[in-house]
Amino acid sequence: MEFSCWQKETITADECPFVAAGDHPLLFDRRQRFLRHCVNCSTCLQSLAHVTPGDGVDAALPPLLIEALCLHQERVRALERHIATRDRELAFLHDVGQVLQTSVDRDEVIAMALTAITSGKGFGLNRAILLLVDEANERLVGHLAVGPREAEEAGRIWHEVESLDYSLIEMGERFFREKMASEREKFGPLLECLTTPLAQRDHPFVRVLDARTPYQIDDLFAEPGLDREQAEDLGVQQLILVPLISRDRRIGLLLADNCINRRPLTAGDLHSLETFALPVSFAIERAALYARLQQELGRVLEAHARLQQQQDIIVRMERLALLGRLAADLAHSIRNPLLIIGGYARTLLREAPPGDPRRDYLESMVRESRRLEETLQDVFSHTEELHPTFGLWDINRLLAEVAGEMRDDLALGRVECRLDLAPLLPAVRVDFRKMHHCLRCILNRAFEGSLAGETIVIHSERRQDELLVHIRDGGPTLTPEEIATIHAPIDPAAGDRHLFGLSLCAQTLREHRARFLIESDSVRGTHYLIGLPIPEEA
Amino acid sequence: MARLLVVDDERDIRHLYAAELGDLGHEVETAGSAAEAAEALERSSFDLLILDIQMKGESGLQLLQRLVRDKLKTPVILCTAFGCYKDDFSSWLAQAYVVKSSDLTELKSEVIRVLGKNQ
């Protein structure tokens, strides 16, 4: 049988398609050529499969075949190890990813992320440090660090972890529940030392954050821009820096090192952390947004409760005012006849001579009319506050007073209120108390329709025979149907309580013969216009 | 002796005030509305005006503002069943504010005080 090239000591380049142009030495080295190419060549393997003892194959072939086999076995083992590592990493990323995707607690997310970086079941680095961007103060602030500080502590922790055999999730949860506060305290000085102003653009932390690409420092003390004190406090030579970026927003910076076992950091470590940083950034951002949402929700609920409370007060006051009006009208109709009866009785009594038997009757009339007048006076003093007191008032003063009363609420909701009041406006005839409630109710509504950062504008002006008050907010709050409901006569049985206050306003303004217009659209927000007639005497 | 004008839309109150204030030695004329009062003021002069506030037609306060605008110097005592009009700026144009009562002591005292001040 004719054997192929594998049996020859020397071959030409035409005989083996696997020997590349730069591999010419292989043409003259049978062993190397066999181990690298022949064992992968189908022609060669086919030829070897048909070798029989009588074919006169040389004695060098069996050792070559064994060596090739060993080499392959080693490669297979390496690949198996690699696959096992990747399997573990995938499982770990899956576990951590679940926590990162489901948790809305920022500290829980951070605890899990840092545990994953430092755990042997995770990336297995010795120490992880998180710095978060503080936009308000323009600083990168040391937030949390995880890991042992010295070899003895490391030995204890690693032994404990090994003996308890916690899963990564369990370790993260345990750290979050039991160790987070103590860890923060333990690394307090280091975290403080690592805090860096964002304006320090040449600092490696800020540089990495700005460049948005991970970076490995191989010699901290030689790194340009890094404070010597920070390098000393870190106490390592090598450090990995990974920026945390979410939707183009700088969240923070992740630092990792092997401060205990001093294992050199590799490009693989850097790459793994870079991949891991993306979901961590999103999770931290989401948790922060959720916290802010909760805070805003709390504010809205608080404002809503207060509005509800004020509406209840308005309704109660309306009822009391009605009652007061009835009582005052009744008292007034009694008072005049009583005054006449009592007044004439006094006159007659004064004129009656001593000993006149009619004096007793007259004295009784005077006494009883006085008693009734006193009772009426009590009724008056209780009802007059609720009785309409139309008078000439400075509307600017009223507006400033109402806006001043809402100052705390506005500040709490971070809504600005700008007063743009025309000077020297004439006084208008209004029931001060009712107009006060009315303006308060509209301003409350405008506040409710505004988001944090928006501005409510209150503007007053004179236009011909009218004094105009404009209140504008930024958000669309009322539909045309709702506006129609506000202007319709009040139906006490209707359940739409959130419009009740404005309905009462509309009624109050009708009583004042004032115009009340509401315009609401998604672009310009809501505009309340009150047009009060200017009295002739003003 | 002074000349007083009592303005009230209640006839019996006008008569009572006229009798009582007349007993003090004053000459009292009465008017049943702001319009009648304005006529009386055009017709003749008075030393003091006693003015009710809530009346049919023009109110006492509106009449008072008109008189002030027309630069009428006659002092005014507002006499009303309500205390709440004290909050109205225009009531401050009057020299005194008396809440109505069958006991006319306070009204009489204010009449004496205001007349004494304006003599």
Image (cartoon, grey):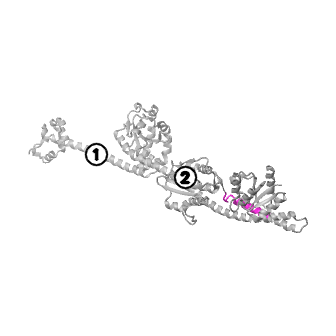
Mark 1 or mark 2: name the one nearer the start of the chain: 1
Residue A360: quarter of image? bottom right
Q: Residues within 10 Å of mark 1 (few under 14, many from 20)?
A: few
Q: Give the spatial CA distance, label 1 vs label 2.
A: 73 Å
- Chain letter of mark 1 equals A
Q: Residues within 10 Å of mark 2 (few under 14, many from 20)?
A: many
Magenta residues span A369-389
Q: Position of residue A98 (x, y in %)?
A: 40, 52
Residue at screen point 75% across, 63% down: A375
On the question of residue B78 being in view, the answer is no
Q: Position of residue A44 (x, y in %)?
A: 15, 45
Q: Which mark is residue A46?
A: none
Q: Are marks 1 and 2 on the same chain?
A: yes
Residue A348: quarter of image? bottom right
State the residue position of label 2: A471
Toward the left, the furthest residue is A1
- Residue type at the position of mark 2: Ile
Residue B60: quarter of image? bottom right
Label 2 element class? strand
Q: Quadrant of the N terminus of chain A?
A: top left
Q: Is A130 left, or right, of A2 in this rendering?
A: right
Label 1 element class? helix
State the residue position of label 1: A79
Classify A173 as above or below A502: above
Q: Compare residues A238 and A378 and report the one nearer the observer.
A: A378
Classify A195 as above or below B39: above
Q: Position of residue B84 (x, y in %)?
A: 70, 57
